[in-house]
Amino acid sequence: VKSSGGNETGKFGHPFGYGFLHEDINNSGDGGIYAELIQNRAFQYSKEFPVSTAHYFPINSASLSIQNLSVPLSKALPASLRVAAGSNSTEYSTGRIGFENEGYWGIAVSQQKYTGSFWVKGAYKGSFIASLQSNLTNDVFGSVEVVSKAVDSEWVEHEFELVPEKDAPNSNNTFAVTFDVGGTKHGYLDFNLISLFPPTYKNRKNGLRVDIAEALAEMNPHFLRFPGGNMLEGLTNDTHWDWKDTLGPLKDRPGFQGVWGYQQTHGLGIMEYLEWAEDMDLQIVLAVWGGLALNGDVTPQDKLQPFIEDALNEIEFVAGPANSTWGAKRAALGHPEPFELNYVEVGNEDWLAGYPGGWNSYREYRFKMFFDAITAAYPHIQVIASAATSDPAPEGATTGPNTVEGLNFTETPGAIGDYHPYRRPDELVEEFDRFDNDIGHIVGEVAATHVNGGQTPRWDGPLYSYPWWQGAVGEAISLIGYERNSDRIPGTFYAPVLKNVNRFQWPITLLQYSADPKQTTRAVTWYCWSLFAHSPISHTLPTTSNSSYGPLYWVAGRDEARNDALVWKGAVYNTTNSSTVPVSVKFQGVAPGTKASLTVLTNSVADNYAYNDPFTGVNIVNTTTSELSAGVSGAFEFVLPQLSVAVLDTGRA
Ligand code: AHR
């Protein structure tokens, strides 16, 4: 049995990290962790997603139309919503008209402070009424009068706070704004950037949805990799995710042609990602655009330098001093202190997208040009290449070995790779020793996505509906395999993490949710990641065993920050044998009677394919915790059931 990896030097300066990749997929940003409640708040559009009044509905026969006024709200937001008296305007020429917005498949309403604003152009003497109301009944849960400051000559922002008098029984509600058309000069008003936020995580303005952020934070994560994933790459070179478009006031953010089938607001911008990391005390893996888009567009070598400078500017924005050019812009946005930045990845999945040109150009010049520039300016930053040594050769790749080693790491010393195993559980278990003899990598995306068997190649078959128990255990074994090599593998990232059950394209995620926070559900796999993440190991320990790996897999270590607590993490994976597995764990130097806490996760229903369904809310993961004492030999003795995941930790006793 191979010893644990032996991260005896604590090389990366932190325990092996469990974390997330976040990009906007499955409405995980807009309509997800980004707390904005109004969908299509600023009529943003792109080539793929034309401007429209989608998600708005007229009140009292108002006519709603999109206008491109000669005086737009801003260069970034040229389109706006005209709300005019409808065709039966005589009837309503003195009445109230307006619009409702349905939110992201509903709006949860409870007795808390909502903070909102909207911009108006057009002279109006009177008041607006902003309200939260039922979509099913005549119930109005709360409303507020907003005195008009609207004029003809310019756009004027109207801000308000709204505290409902009662909770709504469900999330089938809308947000409405009305005005008295008789008080307007022209019989209509133009609206833009209509925004409504509930209280946010750590009370950040323009911040995160509390229940989703808390569920992520409760996993005790260590890493946030952003902004992708495919989102970073963009559909074309001209439409990649440009961090500069995401800065500053919302009226200056044009929105983004997302790569996952919907227009994005840019509300969750680089500053919001950084504050998210800061608020959860996460290490950042910042992915910088590497000159390749999903359609295969490659930036030629003689045109790449501006993008390298752009990446350096982005790094300076994140981590530069407040008196540097971009650090000063960050300081002006309220964060003079640099954010800690130790990891930068160049591109995403360059081995996969846009082959063969994409891969060849990455190997031949793109990665090295970024690596050299970043390393020269920031020698402490670990630069990461967006492929793994085992990634298959793209068809038609012409030069050199078709692996990360083909990147020629002799010319980019110290660079590490990025591995993305979306696999069947059997495959994840087979890969347990994947990193025993390899260069460093992050495991930048991992999940059990397909059930065993099924179609070959696996991507010809569907992803399963939700993370399921057998998948979670197989995945846990791969995590153990990464953690015992933590001298070269700084951490692993679940991907994608969030799914709005109303619109998604990737069902396997850590958390599922709708507009109603009561439906926010942790997947079975969240419990395994959380268990491992709550017992960090700063230094792995060499292990010996009188049996080989399988069906029991393990890693052992100590955690310096917790007074050298001793930790053993294990999992049992055998789908054909139901007998329990006896385990005896002996740490060198542990005296008889030493206490440790043993936590074991199992499936509480007799179905290995069972999952946590947000529509029932039932958690099928059974957690048992017991206190053990080392026996006379100094060993901790226990048994583990089949398909179980366990942690023994002297620091938790
Ligand atoms: O996590 C979903 C997608 O899978 C990511 O965007 C991409 O990097 C990978 O192929």
Image (cartoon, rainbow, N blue to C red):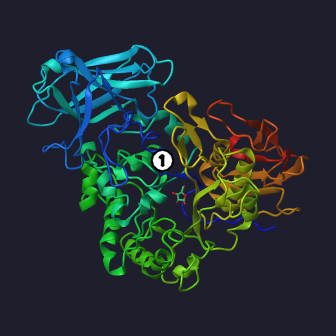
Whether residue 218 is visible, yes or no, is: no
Direction from residue 348 to residue 76 in the image, left or right? left
Of 17 and 142, nearer the camera is 142
Looking at the image, which residue is at 36% across and 62% down?
A: 315
Viewer-proximal residue, 444 or 7?
Answer: 444
Give the residue at x 29% y 20%: 60
Residue drawn 44% across and 78% down? 368
**Residue 205, above or below 453:** above
Q: Amino acid at mark 1?
A: Asp
- Please identify the quarter of the rendering in which residue 195 is found: top left
The quadrant of the image that shows the C terminus is top right
Asked whether residue 499 is in view, the answer is yes
Figure quadrant of the N terminus:
bottom right
| Image x and y of residue 437, in percent | 69, 74
Identify the residue under disc 1: 281
Residues 480 and 98: in front is 98
Q: Locate residue 489: give its quadrant.
A: bottom right
Residue 66 vs 346, above or below: the answer is above
Judged from this view, the residue extending furthest toward the left is: 153
Q: Is residue 565 above or below residue 371?
A: above
Residue 617 placement, left or right of 100:
right
Residue 113 x, y percent position in the rendering = 37, 23
Spot occupied by residue 149 in the image (x, y as percentages of width and height) = 14, 26
Farthest residue, direction front: 87
